[in-house]
Image (spheres, grey):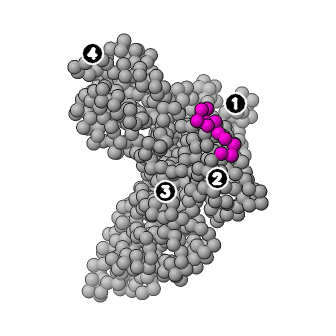
Amino acid sequence: MKLLIVEDDQDTAAALAASLVAQQFTVDTAIEGQAALALAEATEYDLIVLDVMLPRVDGISLCRQLRSHNQQVPILLLTAKDDLEDRVAGFEAGADDYVTKPYERSELLARIRALLRRSSTALTEVFCWGSLQLDPNHCDVTCQGKPLHLTPKEYKLLELFLRHPRRIFDRRTLLDRVWSIDEYPGEEAVTTQIRGLRRKLQKAGLNPDPIETLYGLGYRLRSVPEEDEGDGGDRENGGDQEATSSSPSSPSSPPSSSSPSSPLLPPLSPTEAEAEAVAAIQQMWLEFQERLQGQLAVLEEAISHLCTYTLASDQRQHAHTVAHRLIGSLGGFGLPQAAEIARQIEHALRKPTALVQSEAAAQLESLLQQLRRAIQQSPTYTPTPHTLQVLLIDDDTDLIERMQSDAPHWGIHLETATDLTTARQRLQHFTPAAIALDLTFPNTTETGLTLLAQLKRQFPTLPVLMLTGQGDLTMRVEATRLGANAFLQKPATPAEVFQVITQLLNRIDTMTAKLLIVDDDLDLLSLLQANLQPWGFQVTTLADPSQFWQFLEATTPDLLLLDVSMPGFSGIELCQVVRNDPRWSQLPVLFLSAHSDADTLHRALAVGADDYVLKPIVEADLIQRILKRLGRLSDSHSRSYHVHTSSE
């Protein structure tokens, strides 16, 4: 679906666009009203996010113009103006919703989805075409119950066809709907993406091809072929049934992405685009620092003039505008506390009377100091939470109560059963993403091993964590033979249980890879080792690059991570030495560096770097890049993002 963001502050717009692109939206941006009006008249948007304080034409006036031009597209006003009269004016101008900055990304996304639900096509439907199903809420695609991994463009094309069955789209329309205005592909890009989509659908077993080519006209979704009742085969041109949709909770909806018939893909895991959004926002934050210091200097100068009663009205207005923009940009970077302080500065810069001007200056000085402290924090990115269903089968009511309380913090909806009979009844109605199963139950001779054996026969890939208060080795071995994925000794805390479940759902490979990390920052080495070892990696760290070759020969790593700037030998020199040795020339090399300049990046790539990761390092992004280079990347990503700062 295609969205238009109208925002004159480029930092705010960039951070918001990155978050929305991570949710598979196509996003265009405009920095002023007339450009936005021209885009809205030329392009079919599904929703417009509109700032109020815009140059030349304010957002409320622009909203009126859009409605006067018979534009029925949903409009969400996103602004730092939180007065009641502003809200009323916005709704009277034709806005469908009004959100004040700073905003929570999850709430903003929920409001956007709510507006899209009220438009002509419901966003929360699961779209079906035969055995092909697309769930726009989780950006999941399955074919015959198995996950289908598409590129963002392939996903958007498929979603567009499923939302508009039988509608013919020519290549130019597809370019307008799926590509943003910042991209400049030719019409051959459409052909390439559709060819790739068809290839993946065919490989997944979907037959016939659901996308029909109408030569000279474009593409459309075929009618779903009727199935022969006897053999379930497709008739070549049978049926007029179109793509259907169903509620995610209905019986016809697809199983969760961690369905037992598919690899472990927990619904709450962020998409690859979300991981890329983290890195993008981090890079934007680095680039924003110089502009931020300039904006703080403007505020400081205005406060200084206010103290001496020499603050001119135009200077006050400029400082007020700067504070207003900081509300959006700091909130967009995930610093809500700093954004709230900027809001207080904006309010305090409204013209005070002469009697309270000295008091206002003192208040502003205090707020500016608070703001400088608040921006020392690193920006955060919280991926959109997707609820994961886990079944706990245990008669320990105290553990059940504590886990029910903690489950939402882990993005989990916890179903419970206190005996094996109830558990079997629950499993007839839903398939959880994972099960935590106690071994022993009172008033019965049956143990959890019986149910474990049944589960593994019916759902071979369903992760099962066994819980027990006994340390019996024989029972542990028997549970392992039956297919248990993990074993946890009681007493166990809810955090310990949820952590093991999360690790099971994000397990990539039982084989462990050896990593060698070379960096002269001892704190960073300790941090990276702590973050990477839980994934099963064998991590060796080295702070002295002069010992590099001895460590390389001794550890024979599967992947090398190098700092760029180190005493004695730089990472670029070490990489060049590795590439010059035939034994190590194919070893994957990732650079870790705080240098974001193009020259350093080009030098690293020129000597054979496979990837270049900027500090501060985003844990989930680094793990994803490592797994890609090892050639063992699955679509399970860490669901939590921890932003760590470090310096070379």
Residue at figure coordinates x 65%, y 39% from the top left: 234
Indicate which disc residue 584 carries. 1
From the top left corner, tell me how far across and down residue 221 is, in percent: 64, 53
* Figure check: 49 above or below 193: below
For the residues labelled 2 and 4, say whether their Cβ atoms are less than 8 Å apart.
Answer: no
Indicate which disc residue 221 carries. 2
Circle 1 packing at 10 Å, graded few (<14), some (14-19), many (20+), is: some
From the top left corner, tell me how far across and down residue 289 is, in percent: 51, 62
**What is the spatial separation of the Cα atoms under label 3 and label 2, in whole angstroms?**
19 Å
Indicate which disc residue 445 carries. 4
Q: Which amino acid, by three-letter code, is at mark 1? A: Trp
Circle 3 packing at 10 Å, graded few (<14), some (14-19), many (20+), is: many
Residue at figure coordinates x 74%, y 56% from the top left: 214
Residue at figure coordinates x 53%, y 34% from the top left: 262
Q: Does residue 408 appear to the left or right of 121 in the view shown?
A: left
The region drawn magenta spans 228-238
Dot 3 corresponds to which residue?
Answer: 123
Q: Which amino acid, by three-letter code, is at mark 3? A: Leu
Q: Which quadrant: the N terminus?
A: bottom right
Residue at figure coordinates x 66%, y 37% from the top left: 203
**What is the spatial separation of the Cα atoms under label 2 and label 4, in whole angstroms?**
56 Å
